[in-house]
Image (spheres, rainbow, N blue to C red):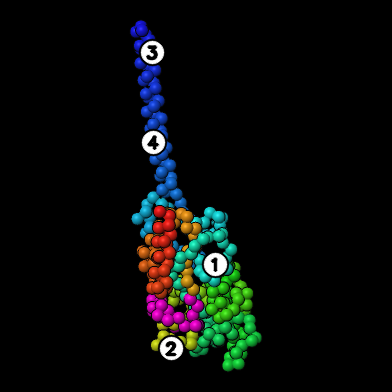
Amino acid sequence: MNKNDKNMKKIVFTIALVLSLGLGSAWAEGNSNSTNETNSSVRTIKSPRFVRPLVEKWIEEYAKTEPGVTFQLVKGSGNQDNIDLLVSFDNQDADTKDFSHIIYFGETAVLPITARSSEAARLLEGKHLNAKKLKQLFFLNDDFDEDVKKNKTFEAITVYSGSNATSVASSFAHNFGEESTNFRGKHIAGDDLFLNTAIAKDPLGVTFNTLSNIFDLQSRHLKSNLSLVGLDLKKDLEKSFTDNGTLDDVLTILENGKPAEVTIEKVGITFNSTDGAVNRFLEWVLENGIKYNHQYGLLNLDSKVAEAQTKKVINTLTAQK
């Protein structure tokens, strides 16, 4: 073999070695990127607006423990097929894709309200309404019990109810044995926050809403432009359900008892159990996320119900291993 042949072989070997190292580096980088993409893949959550601040808090805190997995709150009417988790409540009128499981993390309470210093507030002042009278005020129904006389005052009042799929209108109606199609007055499209706007514009307007839409979450007092409709409650509870009551007082009372006059509905997350990242997130929610319930206007679950939800998620995780 002459000197030129040796030099040529040396050049070829060097090129081959460089190519081999380059491909190996590219393969390693590609695998690294693939792993990172898997770990940082986005999971989407859709939620009614009254729960969104709580969900945003979850996402913020969970990112500190699992920075490789991103959970993102989807707003508006996004493609339902792209939603990984859906926050909903038992009587929500919503067409959702077929999620296989639901876990509950808290409860929402709904109270009747009107605009402060309005004509409706004046007409209802001093009237402590029980469940039967609330039914008469809010619903179209001529078949009232004999002990509930028709109240002409109610006829002058305009009821505003939500018609959005995520409205608590169906929960409020079912609490009084009615359907959401049977409300008196006017139906408002869009988020339930628009109900507050509607009664602010109508001196004779009355409506209902969740605690997080009624109370200021910072001051813990009723929003300054709203007034609670008086309810027929025990004397030691009445003060907390007036315009001078606080959100924390109401939460404490409702966790210790559920009067018929107050609509209370479990709030949960529907999901498919095949995604391990989602299941680990839900386990974190039940262990750590629920401590923010009161801060964002939700009631805590009964201890037995809460324990059952935790077991459900743990069993799902165990089944995947």
> Where residue 8 is drawn, which disc sits there?
3
Image location (x, y in percent) of residue 305: 42, 72
Seen as rendered, the residue at the extreme top is 2
Identify the disc placed on residue 166: 1
Q: Quadrant of the N terminus?
A: top left
Identify the residue under disc 4. Answer: 28
Query: Residue 183 lies in magenta, yes or no?
Result: no
Helix, strand or loop at label 2? It is loop
Decide which of tag 2 and tag 4 comes sooner along the chain: 4
Residue appearing at x 43%, y 86% in the figure = 238
Task: Say few, some or many: other residues with alpha carbon within 10 Å of mark 3 (under 14 / 14 to 19 / 20 or more).
Answer: few
* Label 2 Cα neighbours within 10 Å, binned few <14 / some 14-19 / many ≥20: few
| Magenta-tinted stretch | 242-264
In depth, the one of 85 and 50 nearer the eye is 85
Q: Is residue 56 visible?
A: no
Dot 4, how many residues are within 10 Å of its Cα: few (below 14), some (14-19), or many (20+)?
few
Q: Which residue is mark 2?
A: 234
State the SS at label 4: helix
Amino acid tagged 2: Lys
